[in-house]
Image: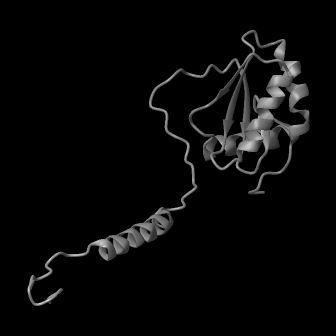
Amino acid sequence: MAFGNNKENKIFSEINITPLTDIFLVLLIIMMVVAPSFQSQDMNVDVPEVNNGVNIEESKVTVAVTHDGAMYVNGEPIQASALTDKLIALKDDNEKQEVIVKADKNIKSSTIMDIMDSAQNAEYKKLIVAGEPLNKKEQKQLEQDARESVNLPTEEE
């Protein structure tokens, strides 16, 4: 391809990279827009396992929450609305003023926040959330103890 007059029969051999740059910029923008959709949307949060730590003393006030949302304070069933009053009543017996929360791993965090609010309203100094969730064996034992204390028939009867 020759440009100019016959005196200058020079060949134009330079490459115009402007269209190539435009294509790469468009591809880059498309990838930046599409890339976030490749990320997984897994919102499940599992409670981490505790390999070592401080042992929980049984003399402290323990609030347990089962998978169905039933609350137990030191093994006795209680309604969520009466939790603050129960914690206030137990505060005199507890010299360390600590509350331990053990809950099923499927319990909503709002339930734990309600327990924290009740402990704060009862003026406890420390709240401990147990590292291990309340397992099924412990939940069944709490439910069985609650039935026996009220003398209700068990599920097998």
Q: Position of residue 65 (x, y in %)?
A: 73, 41
In terms of depth relative to the viewer, which is nearer, 124 or 153? 124
Residue occupying the point 39% across, 67% down: 28
Q: Quadrant of the N terminus?
A: bottom left
- Which quarter of the picture shows residue 14? bottom left
- Which quarter of the picture shows residue 4? bottom left
Q: Quadrant of the C terminus?
A: bottom right
In this rendering, is residue 63 above or below 67? above
Residue 110 appears left or right of 27:
right
In this rendering, is residue 128 above or below 12? above
- Which quarter of the picture shows residue 16? bottom left
In terms of depth relative to the viewer, which is nearer, 147 or 51? 51
Q: Position of residue 2 (x, y in %)?
A: 14, 88
Q: Position of residue 105 (x, y in %)?
A: 62, 46
The answer to whether residue 95 is seen in the rendering is yes
Residue occupying the point 39% across, 68% down: 25
Q: Position of residue 27 (x, y in %)?
A: 39, 72
